[in-house]
Every structure is written in C-alpha cells, then in structure tokens.
Image: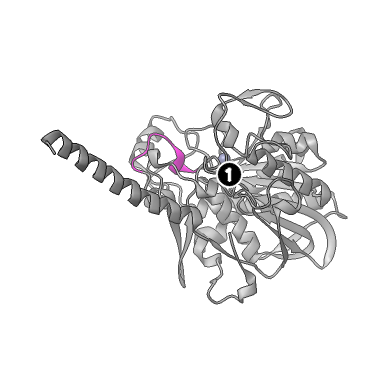
Amino acid sequence: MGRVGAAKAVFVAVTGIVTAIAGVQFHEQRHFRVPIVAGPSVTRVARLSEYGRGLKGTMADTSVFFLEGKEPGGKVLVMSDTHPNECDGLLSALMFIENAVVAKGTVIVIPVLNNSASRNTRPGDGYPLFYGIPTAWGTRTFRFGDRGASPLDQWPDPDVYIHYPDGQLLSFLDARNTNRSWPGRPNGLLIERVTDGVMSLLKRERVDVAIDIHGAETMFPVTNCIVAPEKSMKIATMVSMTVTAMEGFENHVEPSPQGFRGLSHREIGDFSETLPFLLEAPFPFLDQPTGPKTLDLLMTGKDPFLLRLAAEQKLFVPYDESGWPIAKRVGQHCSVALEILDQYSRRNAERAVRVSGVPRYADLVRNGVGAYFRDPSKARARDVYYQ
Ligand SMILES: [Zn+2]
C-alpha cells in the first residue's frame, strides 16, 4: 500500500469510528423510554391508534392519558410535544398528569403528540440528545427531540408540502411538522394520520377545549401569548387579562390567521366543535443568534448574545441577566392552561372542568419544576407508563 492508499485507509477507518459512535448515541436516544407516573386522577391510558387509522405499530402512535372526575362535566385536551424541541410543553403537561386532582369533568392529556419527532434530533445545530430536571430524589431524564418527525419514520420529503384539504403550498420541511398537518387524513403522511387521530378523538369524546403548548424564540413576535381563532377569542382575552393582572407575567392574545393553514388553532376550530388555544412562552434556546446549545442555556435561558440584542431592542420580550428560567416558562404555561379551564367553566356550568393540585406560576418559580415530579421508583409499577 502506497502513502495515498494508507491515507485513504486511515480516512475510512476514522469515518467508520465516528459514524459508529454517533450511530450508537442516536440509537440510544431514539429508544430511550421516559417514565411518566400516573397521578391521583388518571383513570385510564389509551393509545392514539384507538382513535385514528394507520398509526398502530408505528413510531407515531402515542399515549393518551384520561383524568376523570367523579362528577360528569366538560372535557379538555392538553397536548404537548407538537414540537418536541420546545420541551416546556411536555413538562407542563406532566404537571397535569402527575398532580391534577379532577373533581368535575375530564382532562385528557397527550404528552408527546409527535412521538417520532421526540426521537429525532438536529446534529447540525448541536442539540443535546437528553436533558435532566433535578428533583429531591435524583434527576428525571428526558429525550430532547426535534421540530419534525424523524426521516426514519416518514421519508422522503416532498419538494413542496401540499396541505390537505386546503391545497395551500407549504415548505417541504413542514411535511414532518405536526403543526402544519391539521386536520390531517387517515390515509395521508404519517403526521397527517397523527392529527387525524386527534381530530377523531376530539369528536368521539366530545372535547370542549383543546390546549396546544409550545415555546417560541425571543426574536419571534408571537410569544408570551395565546393564539386563538375567532370562536376562542373571548375566553383567550379574559385569560390573558386575568393572568397578567393576578400573576404578574406578561401575556397577550394573537388572532389565528385565517389564510395560514394546517395549524392547530386554525383547523381544530374550523373542523370541530372544540375551542382551540395555542400557548407560547419564551424559549431562548431556539433563537438563532445564541452561543452553543447547552443544557445550561436550555434550563436558564441566559445568553450573552441575546442580552446584547435586548439592549438593541431586537427582542419581543423583556430580557435581562436573569435570562428566562425553565420554572418561569413552565409556570406561565400551567397558569394560562388552568385559567382557560376556569374561564371556560364560568361560562359553561354544565360542561365545567374543575381541577386542583396543578402548580401555578408562583408555585413553580418558588419551588422549581422538579418539586412536582413523582419518583417513578417509588410509584406502584402499574402507575408508571413509558413513553
Ligand atoms: Zn412550536
């Protein structure tokens, strides 16, 4: 073997080793099982494939938690991990599953809406594969996912994503985005089958209110807000005013655009009787001009580049040295979701949903997110579900 041949052999060997190491890490992330402890009001756990066709046996099938009160009433659906890289949504949904005591009505929670995307990552952006929330009994570990479903589950991407049924042309990237595929269809792309499954659930279960929890860049104007279509607007406005006045964090309402298709706050409203609300809170990790995408940035929201942009008034949220810690973000989501239930229940006594035990903004800021997680190793085995 000449010198060139030797150099080629070394190159092939190094590439092989790097590929093998990365492959093992990606495989571990994709198959890591997150424990979720069923709290005091969880009465049953279904699979989304019981509602939608074409999901059974796929990576897109996901758990649906039912928290049923003794007294009949209305029904609310809480969804998170529509975008699994906006992880505050999942943590907020778990606050409901693990803590809520439902006295009247039913709370349905789909904690990982895009299960395939929660097993995807973005190596080009240096995303972490996992993150941990410290608790009194140890660290609770989660997968850190991506915005779109994994190409291992849905591939190839089209050149242009044609929204069903509107026909609007969307970016090819949105072919794997569960917040562009509503209302979905049973024989469409995998993610269209996910949203179709949820639409079937909303109709079959007669769900009154749907809450879809996200996180947004601080440089994006749609943040610290509730996105609501016309029919949800009154409640959204009351919720926004109430939390701002009573709980001391900023929140406003953004109208759901009629001409931008595929989003939950638009299509759920147009294609069902359910009132949809989409929640956004600042999520500095997602901003483009930050330092490395570290776990510290994810937890604290502190970044020197965002601080400089704040001084130049380039951000849409107040931002200082304190960053935007995870407890504040999750707290905002919990308070807004609870206030939506309250405002809806005041107007619809028969279909009210009454919930206690879920921490609000002040509780989470005081005690931290980890204080409200149950220890899976101390729970009864039948109460622990793996997602
Ligand atoms: Zn989102």
Number of numbered callouts drawn? 1
Above or below, 347 relative to 216: below
Q: Which residue is mark 1?
A: 214
Q: Is residue 259 left or right of residue 137?
A: right
Q: Depth check: give the residue in front, 299 or 186.
A: 186
Q: Is residue 65 left or right of residue 319?
A: right
Q: Is residue 224 left or right of residue 29?
A: right
Rendered-image quadrant of the C terminus:
bottom right
Q: Residue at horizontal 71%, vertical 49%? A: 340
Q: Main secondary structure of the magenta part?
A: loop
Q: Residue at horizontal 79%, vertical 36%? A: 271
The range drawn in magenta is 283-292
Above or below, 191 relative to 358: above
Q: Is the residue at mark 1 in contact range of ligand 1, meaning its CB lies under 8 Å from it? A: yes
Above or below, 210 relative to 63: above
Q: Position of residue 56 (x, y in %)?
A: 68, 52
**Residue 85 shows in the view:** yes
The answer to if 11 sits in the magenta stretch is no
- Type of amino acid at the residue the image marks with label 1: His
The answer to if 289 sits in the magenta stretch is yes
Above or below, 173 relative to 378: above
